[in-house]
Image: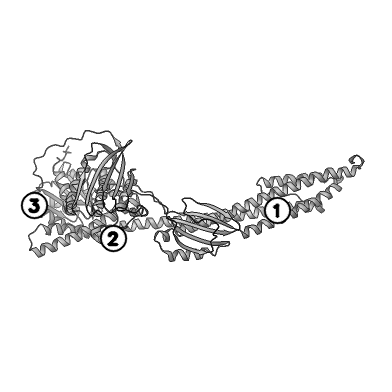
Amino acid sequence: MMQSWGIRARVILVAVVPAIALAIFMTAYYTHSRITDLEEAYRDRGRAFARQIAAATEYAVFSNNREDLRRLLDSARAEEGVRGIIISDTSGRELARSGVITSELPLRSVQRSHDEGVNQTLRFYEPILPTRLDVDLLAFDDVQQGSSTQQLGTVILDLSRTRLDERRDTLMWTGLSALMLVLAGSVLLAIRMSQGVSQPIRNVAEAVGRIGAGRLLERVEVRGGGSLKRLAVGVNDMAERLQGAHEDMTRRIAEATAELRARKEEAERADIAKSRFLAAASHDLRQPMHALGLFIAELSEKEHPPATHRLVRQIAASAEAMENLLDSLLDISRLDAGALQPNIQPTPVQPILDRIANDFHIWAEERHLHLRVRPCCHWIATDPLLFERILSNLVSNAIRYTDNGSILIACRPDGDALRIEVRDNGRGIEADAQELIFQEFVQLDNPERARSKGLGLGLAIVRRLTHLLDHRLSLRSAPGRGSVFGVSARRVDAETPPTLPPTDRQPGSLQDVRIAILDDDPLALESLNSLLCSWGCEVTSAAMPSALIDALAGGPAPDILITDYRLQEHLTGLEVIASLRHAFGYQLRAILISGDTASDPLDRARAAGVPLLHKPVRPAKLRALVQRMLASEPADIAN
């Protein structure tokens, strides 16, 4: 039959068939691509909005403030297409709800974000995670800690697909309309093929290909008229719509990302401000607490009537409680600010265990508990001071929450590591509270905040210190079956400990020891002077460096110099120490005392080889340090 067709019919057939096939393919391809892009963009919008809700509700979920959660969810419901929102905790318990939730999809807690869909609803699941804070470290006399992140809850968000379906239908009709235009243009093209219309068709096809490849700024050159012109205009219009939709979605994603970033930065600034506040507040309280502790220590050594002696003990107990709180706040602020730098070295475990047993056995006996320590011959890589603080906090916690029975400290090899465990047969801890106890000021059995039950900072310090030392912290516990806290550290080969030279000085005696004191705080100067005199020391004190140098001129050199770090006359204690060492011609023993918790004083003291004590200084600790320094001989530096 085709053989009887004329040339015009054959040309029309050759022109129309490829044009129709191309139009159907291109329209279907780009319509399908656009629909896919729209659906993915809609899902991206839902995920981003779920993340915004998770970030905004983090603190309210953490504090279990359901009123704030309801207000936040009601505000979020104003977003276009939102059908319902649920906030649940990690166990799946509902905390807050707003709007209508589809029952055809499951409600569950998740550990990572994902989404599901059914009929006219898309459901998004987003975990609520606390802000992570990474910490560094500095060294101090009695400190240790670590940190970690745990899911707080889940955001479940239902979005309606109605708007998405409307846009999809619109796009389908647009595609069909474009296809009709192409069909009409094909017929006209076939009719006017002899007039050179084939080349413009190829141009349209090439332009559409470039647009489909992602070059959305590409446009078809409009040439001629009729169907060919309408085809070119339709392709350009479709490209403009694609470009506009792409730019709009990109802008929305950028806005959502910027908002999330701003919330994250705001949370980080709040955390830094908290650490700075704790450091500043503790510094301002340390000066009077330092003087108070020294006055109380001196007062307790004097003879008093029984009633007065009882009052002195109560004052001392109150002052010690305040000092413990300040020390704990200082530890937390140092760890959060990254001010502690650990001194990792090969350390024998047994001496630390011996000191722990010696420090806590009286308290354990008072509570009718049996404290046992299994011998351990291993060495580990750790900071001995910080590691001892970790074990002290764990043992203190075990004694405080064990009503009867025993507490065991034992060591177990664990591959290349050594796990030191503190076991008790106390009350135990519920599974859902085992992460909560490592947060600040959390005490499960102390709603009345009784001081005798601690401050709720011990385990928070333990977590931060174990993280700082790169040790692994573990916990096994069940209600009524006790708890096992474990700290794993890398094992190392044992080293030969240095041999200390013998000393003839009678332990505990400070009679006639010459001590020079320098402090620009009158109250601190007077309290330290009075305490040392009560110990039998010969004290020379001054508030200014020049006054102390004048007082020591022509007299015997002091055995030990105790000086504040920041002094008048624009000098530091280290500069005064260097000046006196040069004047006396030998390495004068010296102790720095400071209420400044920043890392700079400690770094400078370490570099100079001078021990630094933070205010308030406990008298027993000061006396032990003085005894230890008197047991060493000063080095001659004279020319």
Q: How is the image coloured?
A: one colour
Q: For residue 446, which numbered disc appears in the image?
A: 2
Q: Is residue 223 visible?
A: no
Above or below, 518 relative to 350: below
Q: Nearer the viewer, residue 624 or 114?
A: 114
Tag count in the figure?
A: 3
Q: Secondary structure at mark 3?
A: loop
Q: Residue at x 22, y 55 (%)?
A: 616
Q: Position of residue 45 (x, y in %)?
A: 56, 55
Q: Residues within 10 Å of mark 3 (few under 14, many from 20)?
A: some
Using the rendered view, name the quadrant where residue 530 is placed: bottom left
Tell me how far mark 1 sits from mark 3, CA to CA.
96 Å
Kind of residue indicated by mark 3: Gly
Where residue 373 appears, as percent x and y from the top left, is 21, 43
Q: Nearer the viewer, mark 3 or mark 2?
A: 2
Q: Residue at x 20, y 35 (%)?
A: 497
What residue did someone put label 1 on?
238
- Type of amino acid under label 1: Met
State left or right for residue 570 relative to residue 517: right
The answer to which of marks 3 and 2 sits earlier in the sequence is 2
Which image quarter holds the N terminus?
A: top right
Q: Tell me the residue that label 3 is attached to.
A: 536
Q: Position of residue 103 (x, y in %)?
A: 54, 59
Amino acid marked by disc 2: Asn
Disc 1 and disc 3 in contact, CB within 8 angstroms: no
Query: Looking at the rendered structure, which numbered label has been put on residue 107?
Result: none
Nearest to N terminus: mark 2 or mark 1? 1
Q: Secondary structure at mark 2?
A: loop
Is 566 on the left-hand or right-hand side of 304? right
